């Protein structure tokens, strides 16, 4: 009886581990300005695919990884954020199959010498 339980537990662990897949994350800038996106792996063993693209674009985040996303767009301050695959799994649980979307608000740069405040 004990061997059967251990086998069932091992089978369940293998089944769950086999279901963990990379998550495709669509990234765009809030006001739809095109931005250069670059990722760097913070932890884990597999970088995003691709590691560089122009937004809007989709990057694949592998299980067990933490990725840093860098965004740069003309006329805006650059942005950097960190995401973990596990957080994406939690955020997408029960989702209707649509690709998760990350909209990043970039802050406009104030024109030099204009005295005009940036718009949020």
Image (cartoon, rainbow, N blue to C red):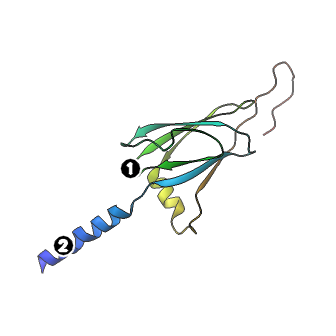
> Residue 92: percent from the left, percent from the top?
53, 62
Q: Tell me, yes or no, whether the two marked residues, 2 and 1, touch with CB atoms within 8 Å.
A: no
User: The C terminus appears in which quarter of the rendering?
Assistant: top right
Residue placed at 74% from the left, 45% from the top? 32
Q: Earlier in the sequence, mark 2 or mark 1?
A: 2
In the rendered image, residue 47, in percent from the top left (x then y), is placed at 43, 41
The relative height of residue 33 versus residue 99 in the rendered view (above or below) is: above
- In-image side of 3 versus 49 (left or right): left
Name the secondary structure under disc 2.
helix
Q: Image quadrant for the N terminus?
A: bottom left
Q: Is 46 situated left or right of 2 in this image?
A: right
Residue that mark 1 sits on: 64
Residue drawn at (28%, 66%) of the image: 13
* Residue 76 figure quarter: top right
Looking at the picture, tell me which residue is in the foreground, 19 or 104.
19
Query: Mark 2 highlights which residue?
Result: 7
Q: Residue at horizontal 49%, vertical 44%?
A: 49
Count neighbours of disc 1 (C-alpha within 10 A) and say few if under 14, some if 14 to 19, many if 20 or more: some
Q: Report the Cα–Cα distance between label 2 and label 1.
A: 25 Å
Vertical placement of residue 74 versus 62, above or below: above
């Amino acid at each position: 009886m004990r061997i059967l339980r251990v086998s069932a537990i091992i089978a369940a662990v293998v089944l769950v581990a086999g279901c963990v897949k990379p998550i495709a994350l669509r990234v765009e800038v809030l006001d739809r300005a095109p931005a250069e996106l670059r990722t760097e792996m913070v932890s884990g063993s597999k970088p995003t695919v691709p590691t560089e693209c122009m937004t809007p674009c989709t990057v694949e985040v592998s299980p067990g990884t933490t990725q840093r996303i860098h965004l740069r767009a003309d006329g805006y301050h650059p942005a950097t954020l960190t995401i973990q695959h596990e957080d994406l799994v939690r955020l997408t649980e029960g989702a209707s199959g649509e690709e998760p979307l990350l909209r990043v608000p970039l802050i406009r740069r104030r024109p030099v010498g204009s005295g005009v405040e940036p718009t949020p």
